[in-house]
């Protein structure tokens, strides 16, 4: 192994150890805090603790992957995802929540770039996502969001501010927030080599703003509408993605590959709506969602989702859901590039996530409140299957436990 590769592998090993130590230490520390005796009204105290484990199994093929067996490469992906949620009250006006997901990822697509060492076969990530809420007076809530993300090839920091106002005797709410993100990453690959010469790093950033209005129409009916806009700038590619070059008409054999290339600006817009209807007679709640998305990459997407919550007993309910999504491709999507027309400066991608497709998702979850007279302890188990018309299937199994203090 060359010295540079040895250095990079050693750095990845140190990063993995750091992430795994954080993942082990955090729940132990939180658990110790959660068992502490009662506090005075103005002292810190934990109010809710949630832990969840999910397993993601993805299979399929996409032209952006060089993992083989042909130009349409494997998109096999396995993710083990323990996650932790903590809600703590500092005093009667200030509340903090912290979400910490940890991902352990095995990916055929990213592993394919390390033809010499397979150092990308397994990747660990951790995110700390913290929100502080301040309520003063009772109808106004300000929130401050901040955190960071660590990954072997990728670092990210983010921060945001939000404001919510209760109106019409708390029957209506208007909320808005603004968030900023900055990413720094190594543009690995996509052709063998662990990193580019000189340890070059790329950056990108994003600004996001959202506005949401909700209204209680009756004791059993709620409606909500929202709009979000996101502006991205910088290097927007996925570093290990590639585009087949010089292929036959069926794109079953190609002469080679080139790295994908994106415009360095993107403006994204999304409108959403929700109708929630409770049916007291059957102890059921029906939720209908719709979202329309468009951006300046010429993508137009429609998403519809229906959820049914049904109490089976006073201490258990079942949630069933179905989601349908359709989108067209970005204007520069292609299965392969003809060598005769190849322009190295033109945008290009073969990413299956940016192609035209229909997607469907069905899911279910069982929630059980363990305590007969209170919801201090609860457990849930869920399963979701996602599939789409361009050869991708994802199965997700989850198990969660929550405790209120």
Image (spheres, rainbow, N blue to C red):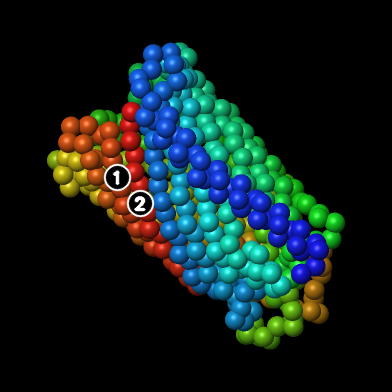
Helix, strand or loop at disc 2? strand
Residue 355 x, y percent position in the rendering = 58, 66
Looking at the image, do the residues carrying marks 2 and 1 touch, with CB atoms under 8 Å apart? yes
Residue 226 x, y percent position in the rendering = 48, 38
In the rendered view, would you say 125 is above or below 33?
below
Residue 157 x, y percent position in the rendering = 65, 39
The mark tally for this picture is 2
Residue 71 x, y percent position in the rendering = 64, 79
Identified at 71% across, 72% down, the residue is 116
Quarter of the figure with the C terminus: top left
Quick one: label 1, few (<14), some, or many (20+) residues within 10 Å?
A: some
Helix, strand or loop at disc 1? strand
Q: Is residue 187 left or right of residue 273?
A: right
In the rendered view, would you say 212 is above or below 59?
above
Quarter of the figure with the N terminus: bottom right
Residue closer to the observer: 20 or 359 = 20
Determine which quarter of the picture holds residue 38: top left
Identified at 47% across, 31% down, the residue is 97
Residue closer to the observer: 8 or 375 = 8
Determine which quarter of the picture holds residue 194: bottom right
Q: Is residue 250 visible?
A: yes
Which residue position holds label 1?
379
> Which of disc 1 and disc 2 is earlier in sequence?
1
Q: Is residue 243 left or right of residue 325?
A: right
Quick one: label 2, few (<14), some, or many (20+) residues within 10 Å?
A: some
Q: Is residue 347 visible?
A: no
Identified at 30% across, 48% down, the residue is 380
Identified at 34% across, 43% down, the residue is 401
Which residue position holds label 2?
399
């Amino acid at each position: 192994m060359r010295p540079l590769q040895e250095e990079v592998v050693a750095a990845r090993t140190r990063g993995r150890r750091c992430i795994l130590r954080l993942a082990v230490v955090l729940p132990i520390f939180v658990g110790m805090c959660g068992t502490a005796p009662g506090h005075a009204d103005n002292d810190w105290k934990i109010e809710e603790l949630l832990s969840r484990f999910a397993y993601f199994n993805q299979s399929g093929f996409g032209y952006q992957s060089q993992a083989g067996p042909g130009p349409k490469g494997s998109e096999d992906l396995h993710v083990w995802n323990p996650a932790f949620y903590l809600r703590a009250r500092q005093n009667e006006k200030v509340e903090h929540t912290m979400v910490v997901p940890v991902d352990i990822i095995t990916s055929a697509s990213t592993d394919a770039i390390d033809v010499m060492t397979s150092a990308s076969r397994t990747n660990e990530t951790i995110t700390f996502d913290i929100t502080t809420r301040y309520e003063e007076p009772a109808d106004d809530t300000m929130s401050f969001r901040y955190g960071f993300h660590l990954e072997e090839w990728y670092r990210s920091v983010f921060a945001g501010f939000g404001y919510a106002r209760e109106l019409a005797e708390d029957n209506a709410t208007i909320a808005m927030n603004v968030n900023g993100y900055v990413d720094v990453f190594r543009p690995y690959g996509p052709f063998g080599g662990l990193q580019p010469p000189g340890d070059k790093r790329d950056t990108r950033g994003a600004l996001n703003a959202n506005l949401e209005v909700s209204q209680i129409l009756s004791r059993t009916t709620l409606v909500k509408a929202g709009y979000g806009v996101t502006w991205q700038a910088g290097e927007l590619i996925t570093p290990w993605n590639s585009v087949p070059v010089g292929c036959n008409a069926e794109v079953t054999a190609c002469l080679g590959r080139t790295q994908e290339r994106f415009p360095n600006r993107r403006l994204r817009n999304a409108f959403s709506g929700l109708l929630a209807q409770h049916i007291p007679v059957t102890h059921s709640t029906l939720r209908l969602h719709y979202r329309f998305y468009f951006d300046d990459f010429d993508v137009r997407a429609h998403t519809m989702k229906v959820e049914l919550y049904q109490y089976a007993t006073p201490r258990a309910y079942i949630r069933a859901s179905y989601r349908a999504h359709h989108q067209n491709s970005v204007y520069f999507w292609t299965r392969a590039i003809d060598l005769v027309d190849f322009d190295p400066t033109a945008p290009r991608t073969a990413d299956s996530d940016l192609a035209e497709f229909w997607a469907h998702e069905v899911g279910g979850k069982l929630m059980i409140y363990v305590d007969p007279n209170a919801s201090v302890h609860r457990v849930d188990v869920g399963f979701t299957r996602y599939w789409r018309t361009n050869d991708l299937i994802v199965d997700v199994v989850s198990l969660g436990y929550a405790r209120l203090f």
